Amino acid sequence: MFRYALRRVLWAFPTLFATSLILFVVTTLAPDPPLAFDGDGLTDEPARARFLDLPRFVNTHPDDVRSRAETAARHVATGDARGEGAARRLERLGGAALPYVLPLLEALPPVQRQELAAALMPVAVRMELPGATEVDLPEGAVLFWTHFRDDRAVDFTQAAVSRAVDRLVEHGSSLRESDLVSLDTFALADLVRAMMTTDDPVALERLTRLARHAAGRGPVLTWKGAVANGTDLRRVRADWKEWWFVHATDFATIDAFARPFAVITETRYGKWLKRAASGELGVSATDGEPISQKLRARAPITLMVCALAMLWSLALAVPIGALGAWRHGGTFDVASSVVLFVLYAIPTFAVAEVLEHAAIANTEEAPRLALAVAALTVGSLATISRWQRAAMLDVVRQDFIRTAKAKGLPAWRVALVHALRNALLPTMTLAGMHLPVVFGGAIVVEEVFGLRGIGYETLRAIEMHDNAWLMVVVLASAVAITLGMVASDIVCGMLDPRVREVLMRQQARRET
Amino acid sequence: MREESPERLPPSVTIDLTRRTNPRLSGRLVGARQVAMPYVTMTRLALAQLVASRRARVGALVLGCIALTAIFSDFLASDLPLLCRWNATTYVLPNIVRPAALSQLSCARMRELRKAGDWMVSPLVAFGPTEKDADADVLLPPCRRGHPLGTDAFGRDVFARVVHGSRTALGIGVAASVVLVTLGIALGALAGFAGGLVDGLVARTIEALTSIPTILLVLVVGALVPRPSTATLLWTIALTRWTELARIVRVEVLQVLGRDYVTAARALGSSALRILLRHIMPNAIAPAIVAMVFGVASVVLVEAAVDFLRVGSPDTVASWGEAMGEARAHAGAWWLIAFPGLALLTTLIACILVGEAARDAIDPKLREHAFAEDEKL
């Protein structure tokens, strides 16, 4: 039993993966804005936040700080058409690029060396290196960087930076702060990491100030703000985390372990999936509220409507369908068949509409939730009871029912124990597959009755073109429905060993 | 001796034998041939039963009427006359041809501006589906001033919207189901036939698509696409609803592949394509018909629901769902729900009747019970 459940759960993963692929393709339906490229990189920030600079599925040449720095340096040195943009880019890459650009400096012919060294000087100024402002000749710049490499190369190692940042958090001083200023963007990875872990307001202020200095953007958290309320802290942290998620490869190398996977992870799909999987769902375009928070606020209403409708329709449909089949051809069967057939054909939104009109005509304060559940129940009730009737009819015609009757068992026992138990299984399986329909119906019903659930919010998002919310909603509902189907399959497996066997046998056949 | 045997043997076998051996006998087997033809496939049996089913006949009749309404909707309700003489020129079917000279006119205006010698033959209702009444007769109840079913909040004639809505509904429904049936058969057959990795891929895709609510996906795609149109809706539904049929066809293919006659065909040197077309496809046609009919129903339903939620601008294409959505803002206007709702319900019921009769016809388990069931409904 446990093995069956485990196997069924594991089988859901490829399905979820396929769902994510489909939904990713759907996201690309939104038109891409025109992109602004500068030097060798995308400068359009909103476009970068959507990873439009990355290929869709396969990245054969994943860029990191090293490749970016080397390309930019080469463009600057040769002074070609892209040199202008590349110089700006090199300045933006800053300290993180130095370990890769300075060795290049030695290898270049003299004229190109001077070009490159001069282009690097703004970085030195930002790093507040002694004597950086006095350098005005290209020859001086070359000399400056040669000295810098001899003196400071030791500081530009991962371990040294981690230690420096840890020390700053432990016992911060302005001297330690200026040490980190001279590391510039090379320290960003550790600064952002420390921001997420420490709660010390003074340290947070220093960290955000340093990060802002190096990155040239982003919020600074004053220690007063950090002490006074948690919202500032959360907002600033989220901002830096998001920024680092997008820009990490500008300032950090892809290490040897991650490099083989970068072919897949450094793509639009990879980033999108990582974001979705980690619950980083972005920010709603309509009101700037984080989507995960909004989802948490809205989902209970929708889930409750769905669950109540499902429970009610199962509770009503099973007896109706079973009784109809048991008294096959009787008055109840014919009457219920006709009524259910009509109910089956009536669209949910029409039921909701009629109910709403009726309720508004009669009472001012209509019980909206109850009406919504009722409207949603009608459709599912008809569908499920028709399945139940068909399943029961199948069972009732089998020989073992005749045998049970013949050996003199009371009718109720034959009906409930022999027939209904067997007839319930197909209904349960189909009820699991009915979940998407119920969910889709809930969206409509919420809108009609003005319940502020997921459906209501989704329709507002469509009006406001809030694409981030739309994608999250489809993904979340698909995941929820997949989980519901897994649950219904596991219940069926518990009730019926044959169902378990099918999955196991399928497995065996696939393996051989 | 031989002349008696046909009555006792199952009809299909009998015909197959007598046709080849004794042509004189075939004249005596007319009754039997109506039930089944030579080369009995599952599809032929199912079709024979489908034709005999009363549910299917009623459903098909209703669907036929709706289809006729859709095709001839311009004759039932249009803003231009069927035949008219205007400014000394005779126009034949201006409601379909749409001549430039009459582009600024409508039946109502033509009646006002009529000069001597002008005459016109109006359609049943002299209003188009998007035409707003000049008198600003908004929300008229039924049977007032030439509007048999009343008008909506924009002063558009409800009868015209219902009649022209059938064109939208059936057009999208049939087009989308043709695509989804094609996709379903192709992918289902491919999965069953190829097996292995392809099978796994198709199976995962089916499961993934099943777990996404169609209405939600249609709404979201409509919001993401730069210029959403009816075609967007059509493709979204067609590309996501093929899963059910593909699942059935796949199982069908797997079952047939295990039969002896396929092994025999393979041993005789038939190519994979021949086996697929000759031995497998005939069995997949019956499920395809079922999927097609239910496909039309579900597409019509989704289209109506989406239009209901996105109540359009006054100039949108006529659609039942949109008409019903307008009733939300106008509490007393029952005719805005009732008539389009009735049209929608009739279409859905007819589709379901035909679809269920077809499904029962395919199911060999139900074959002997089907006629008994049929008597009841």
Image (spheres, coloured by chain):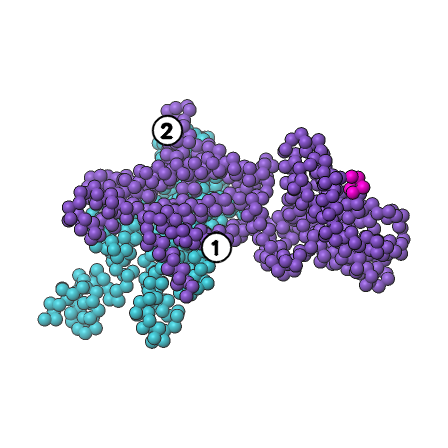
The foreground one among A9 and A175 is A175
**Within the magenta stretch, is there residue A326?**
no
Residue B13 screen position, x and y as percent: 20, 67
Is B12 situated above or below B144?
below
* Predominant SS along the magenta part: helix
Residue A491 screen position, x and y as percent: 37, 47
Q: Callout 1: residue from which chain? A: A
Is A266 situated above or below A358?
below
Q: Is residue B340 visible?
A: no
Is B126 situated above or below B37?
above
The tag on residue A14 is 1
Residue at the disc numbered 2: A358
| Same subunit, tags 1 and 2 | yes
Number of disc labels: 2
Residue at 31% across / 73% down in the picture? Answer: B264
Give the residue type that dot 1 points to.
Answer: Pro
Q: Is residue B366 visible?
A: yes
| Foreground label between 1 and 2 | 1
In the image, the segment drawn in magenta is: A173-177
Residue at 24% across / 53% down in the picture? Answer: B366
Q: CB atoms at circles 1 and 2 under 8 Å apart?
A: no
Which image quadrant: the C terminus of chain A? bottom left
Residue A381 screen position, x and y as percent: 33, 40
The foreground one among A498 and B199 is A498
Residue at 67% across / 49% down in the picture? Answer: A247
Is B282 situated above or below B108?
below
Q: How far is the residue under mark 1 from the one under mark 2?
A: 46 Å
The foreground one among A505 and A356 is A505
Q: Earlier in the sequence, mark 1 or mark 2?
A: 1
User: Color used for chain B?
Assistant: cyan
Q: Which chain is purple?
A: A
Give the residue type that dot 2 points to.
Answer: Ala
